[in-house]
Image: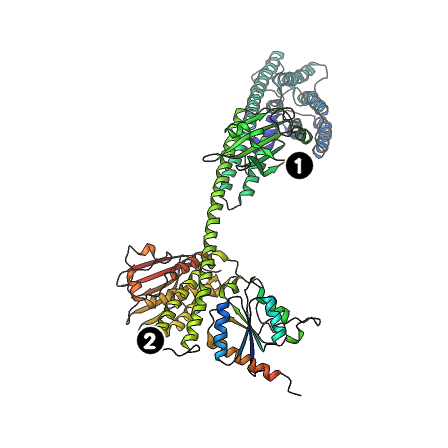
Amino acid sequence: MTDRPKILVIDDDPDVVELMRIALEANGYEVCSASNGTEGLRAVKEIRPDLIILDVMMDTTTEGFQVSYQLRSRDPDSAYGEFSTIPIIMLTGISQKMQMKFSIQKDGDYLPVDEFLEKPIQLDPLLEMIRKLLQRRKENAPGPG
Amino acid sequence: MRRDPADASHMKPLLHGLLRGDPLVKLQWWVGLRWGLLGVAMLMGLWGTRLPHTRFPTAGILYTCLAVALLNVCFHFRLAVFRRTAGPERRETEWLTKIFFVTDPIFLGVLFHLTGGAASPLLPYTVLHATLSGGPLETRSALLYAGAVVAGLAGAVFGEWLPNGSRVYGIPIPGTGLHPDPWGVGWMVVLFAAVLSACLLFVSSLFRHLRESLLQLSDLQRTLQPAKNKLERLNEVANITSSTLGLKPRIDFICSSVRELMGVKGVTVRLLDERTGKLELMSSCGLSPAYLNKGPVEANKSLAGVLRGEPQFVADATHDPSTQYPQEAAREGIASILSFPLQGRQKIIGALRLYTGEKRQFTAEEMDFLSTLAGQGAIFIENARIYDALKRQDEAKNEFILMMTHELKGPLMVVQGFLEVMQKGYVGAVSAKQKELMERIQKRIESVMGISAELLDLYQWQTRGREVEVAPISFNKQVQKAVDLYGVVAQKKGLSLKPELPKEDYLVQATEEEVEKILGNLVTNAIKYTPAGGEVCVSLAMVAGRMQLRVKDTGIGVASEDIPKIFKEFFRTQRAKRMDPDGSGLGLPLVKRIVEGLGGDITMESVENQGSELIATLPRSA
């Protein structure tokens, strides 16, 4: 086991995954990847990542959202209840955002994701965002023992 | 209310009623005239007591008047009842008329007798009364009536020779010897009879003449009315062609117009599907769904004539061999079917069909009318199809551009990302030359990304339409905001950017994003193409009730031959390209689209080397 925070990248574009891997590993993170929603959900259970980077549009235009809704489900019988606190960064394109029929406002009551990051991805803001989210998670986590 | 020129109902109702021969109006007229006569007689009775040589028997006159007044009151009430109910029965009005014309001469005779016989001062008024009363009568009846009145007078005169028969012996006219000379009295009666008959003949023939004219006018109106209705409908059909209604409502309108004007059972418009040779129902009225959905209508079976471009008439749809569904037609109660080709520019595009409930023939005039209507319908069905096809093409083009730019962006973003990780040294050390080249690549990619973002912007504006909610936006505030925002850039370049704003707030119905795009593009363009030391001025004014935004610079300007192309996508002048190689040529087209979407327009005025001025005119929000 390493101490490095584990980040799961869920994206169907292998180049994007590779790009993320290079950038994140260079900054001291351990990177795992999945190329679709189902695989991503399975990986969450197996790997128990510290943070998830999720592309909104994979096979379908809303696949990313479906993954995040599953992870954040409030259903007590949900298979992913224990993972509901994992921070999620969602990657969106401008045009995708415009075509969306549902609100992607983070209106406080129900957060499907923690942050949105618009494409094209700029690495510095992404790294900063990851750092902050992990920091917050560490602070909110119950102390050892 | 619109007045019909051929309709004489706007004439005075009384006169019109008399001319038309309305029995109720005639009775009213006579009762009214009798009230007038009663008034004159009563005056005479009262006045007669004051004359120096004449003594009219006042009591006798008044009693007679009272009796007639009672009769008149009865008439009056009877008429009031008629007016409340649907109207009098013919026989009853005939009876009332008879009673009137029998009692009138008797009443006049008694009054003559009481007021001086042949010398009665009532005689001149009697001519007026009898003429007006007899006017609406037929000539024969009028002459009979005149005879009866003269008989009344003769009776009165005869009464004067009876011993103690008469009460008054006339007004003596000194020197004439007319009274009580029987010959003089005789002449008087004859003259009265002649005058009265002549008057009655004249007025009665005048009435007859007018009545005939009126009837001719009504006949003319009746003949013209259907033609007028048709013209009006054709006009409405023509008007509806240029309306913004969709194709279906327009064709529905034609169907219902045809059905109404031709008085047929039902009308359908069917369009020919060239692939299958079947006629597909587009619009219908007056027919049951069961009949309409009876099955496919084969054009070459039931409409061979129409396919050749001729009208086709089936007189007996239930037995004619060309009818495809005779049983269904019988069940629906259809007797005949008339079909017209919808003749497009090059080919037959369908058929207009009329279904009658009874066997009937159509006149040549009706056929012409229907043929015109079918022609008109065909033209706008065809126009609408062309329009739809163009619209679909345009939408497909927009969709394609959106997809293409989107597809382009994905890989470019990844390339950009890889460049960034390489530049950051995440995948090994980078030499100075490599770094420089990477920066160049980065810049070129950014330029392509910029163009694709603007293209997306431009076409998204077009495809998404204006379903976004608009609100009144203060242009003054937005101009100030833009000046503040771009002032820094202008200052850096050594330009002055100043607003010229009116005190009054100018509001325009738009979204903030739209206004920002308009101002942002116009102001940055002006800054971009104005060399150092120049000036950019943004002003607002009201011109002819619309708001005018002017962005004026002292920049490089545009040659007059290039001005018309300036709002075309990707167009850039050579000088502009030299000054700013990265520009896309999509800014002004976007501004134009937004401005037009807001109901305004935009123009450019420019002199090369002196500067340009972009003038956007927008409707002001109330």
Instruction: Say left or right for B342 vs B264.
Output: left
The image shows residue B167, relative to residue B278, as above or below, that is: above
Tag 1 subunit: B
Q: Nearer the viewer, residue B109 or B571?
A: B571
Which residue does the numbered mark 2 point to in the structure image?
B433
In the image, which is nearer the foreground, mark 2 or mark 1? 2
Residue at the spot 57% in from the left edge and 64% down from the top edge: A62
- Identify which amino acid the numbered label 2 is placed on: Lys
Q: Position of residue B341 (x, y in %)?
A: 52, 31
Quadrant placement of the N terminus of chain B: top right
Q: Is residue B497 visible?
A: yes
SS type, badge 1:
loop
> Dividing the picture into quarters, in which one does residue B38 lie?
top right
Mark 1, other Cα within 10 Å: few <14 / some 14–19 / many ≥20: few
Label annotation for residue B288: 1
Q: Is residue B547 visible?
A: no
Tag 2 subunit: B
